[in-house]
Amino acid sequence: MKAALVGADGELLHQDRRATGRERGPDAVVADILGFAADLRAHGVRRYGEPASAAGVAVPGIVDESGGVAVYAANLGWRDVPLRALLTERLGVPVALGHDVRTGGLAEGRIGAGRGADRFLFVPLGTGIAGAIGIDGRVEAGAHGFAGEIGHIVVRQQGAVCPCGQRGCLERYASAAAVGEAWAAACGDPGADAADCAKAVESGDVRARRVWQDTVDALADGLVTALTLLDPRTLIIGGGLAEAGETLFTPLREAVRRRVTFQKLPSLVPAALGDTAGCLGAGLLAWDLLADTTDPSSPSEVTT
Ligand SMILES: [Zn+2]
């Protein structure tokens, strides 16, 4: 869990991290989130003489943002946790609840790599692949909270089985985890990961270049589907795989460019905020709650 005090312009005033402790079960995780937020409030009082004016929290899985409910998270094991009500009761201030990737995308779009873009798509390539669709300063959640799930666009007919129940999902080819697995199989070192693959590509390894090109092709197929639908001005790629820098971005821009015909090419850029994006985005959600009654001197408080 990452937590921060965030100022009115999205500046990071204080941050802290704690283990999620998910092995102790969902009730313990929820209790820890509430305790972490209360400790952060106390820090704000000590440091600024008053508590944060609002709080934002971003969690993984299925999130009902308007109802303030953490509906389901496979990795945390919770179902229908009324997190917004619990935090409001604990902190005594307005609380916003968001989805982790959409909230990270909100921060990248407003104060990170997409700053100033009226339409953007944020796609982090990590253990899995998700997406955040940015429209005029907010992120589209969809009718049921599933908007942006680009990782489960099918890019290879009859391809690898995905835990979601389909075959050939983008996530099975272009997540950092999938690239690591493909490179481990190709090079024979079971401990090799995506970063090792990128290094091998840079040193000219032919097998690594093949794995990498397959990844880039699958990713470009998925991204072109998304940009055909959404017409984003900026396409922000984040997560572990984006740390390969131009080793990824140069061939990816070329692969996307080759595929489009009538579509306008968005600028394709690396994410700027790293793993603080979710935390900063939660702060922005909190500030949005105060948008009409802002006292710029008091920081907002966030937990992700
Ligand atoms: Zn899938």
Image: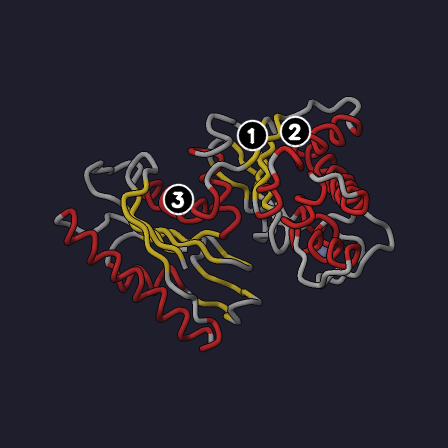
The answer to whether residue 282 is left or right of residue 105 is left
Ligand 1: which quarter? Answer: bottom right
Q: Quadrant of residue 294?
A: top left
Mark sitting earlier along the chain (1/2): 1
Q: Amino acid at mark 2?
A: Asp
- Mark 2 vs mark 3, CA separation in Å: 26 Å
Q: Secondary structure at mark 1?
A: strand
Q: Which mark is residue 299?
A: none
**Would you say the residues marked 1 and 2 are in contact, meaning their CB atoms lie under 8 Å apart?**
yes
Disc sitting over residue 280 in the figure: 3
**Residue 231, numbered label:** 2
Q: Earlier in the sequence, mark 2 or mark 3?
A: 2
Q: Amino acid at mark 1?
A: Arg
Say above or below: 201 vs 79.
above
Residue positioned 83% across, 49% down in the render: 156
**Residue located at (30% from left, 50% from top):** 301
Q: Quadrant of residue 229?
A: top right
Does residue 15 lie above or below 251 as drawn?
A: below
Does label 1 point to a residue whose CB lies under 8 Å from ligand 1? no
Q: Nearer the viewer, mark 2 or mark 3?
A: 3
Q: Disc 3 marks which amino acid?
A: Leu
Q: Position of residue 210 (x, y in %)?
A: 81, 44
Measure how far apart labels 1 and 2 are at the Cα level: 8 Å
Kindly identify which residue carries mark 1.
119
Q: Residue at x 49, y 68 (%)?
A: 80
**Of circles 1 and 3, which is in front?**
3
Left or right of 268 on screen, residue 7: left
